[in-house]
Image (tube, rainbow, N blue to C red):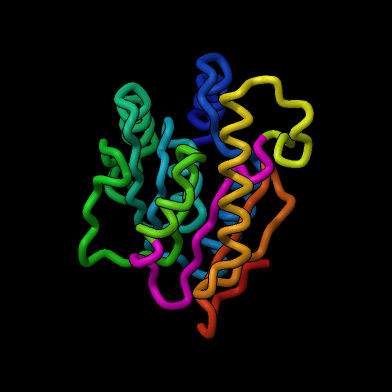
Amino acid sequence: MKELILEMEHYASVNNVPIIELDSIKFIMKYIKLNKVESILEIGTAIGYSAILMANANDICEITTIEKDEKRYKEAVKNVNKSGLDKRIEVVYNDAMDVNLAGCKYDLIFIDAAKGQYIKYFDKFCHYLKPGGIIVTDNLKFHGLVKNKDLIKSRNVKGIVNKIEKYIEYLKTNKDYITKFYDIGDGLSVSFKRNEKRKDID
């Protein structure tokens, strides 16, 4: 497994595929292990890196992960098959906003896809959260640019950062969820329903 993870890290670096930072995935894996998480929904598979690591956090969790880019989807399927976790990780090729998960509920929902769609993803998928479950969002620092907007030269990047800022404000003002922010990796948030007994996060 270690060899496969190193291969994926190399592939991501060479092909400019964004994958989760090590500190961030360790944080999530610790939560999965401590709380015996059984079901995970991931929005944004990329090449399957985070899904494979999350599945390795314990031997019971099952993961549904969604990817709309065909090349990355195929690479993810290949990596999941190589890992031997294809019975526990289902890779779905589709736009997350078009996926129907009627009847499904998850202990953990991980949002790590198009940054400009974060509010839409949260609004749609929060309804699939089990009682006591959490929603984790990655990349809220966006390479440090969220707090250093003066360094941004690209209009496109500035647009992404503006949308991340709106999402952070959306989380802070959400009446149904409490969100904790963590200065880990590229910035993580953990959201859980108000007035619900939640599992340990830290």
Q: Name the residue rendered at 41%, 51% in the picture.
A: 120
Between 177 and 38, the one nearer to me in the picture: 177
Direction top: furthest residue: 14
Q: Name the residue rendered at 56%, 52% in the picture.
A: 167
Between 118 and 22, the one nearer to me in the picture: 118
Residue 197, compared with residue 76, is above or below; it is below
Q: Name the residue rendered at 48%, 58% in the picture.
A: 58
Quadrant showing the C terminus: bottom right
Q: Is residue 175 left or right of residue 67?
A: right
Residue 148: x percent and y percent? 78, 35
Between 160 and 19, the one nearer to me in the picture: 160
Q: Is residue 134 magenta?
A: yes
Residue 35: x percent and y percent? 53, 70
Q: How many marks?
A: 0
Residue 113, compared with residue 54, is above or below; it is above
Stretch in magenta: 126-142
Q: Is residue 165 magenta?
A: no
Residue 79: x percent and y percent? 38, 30
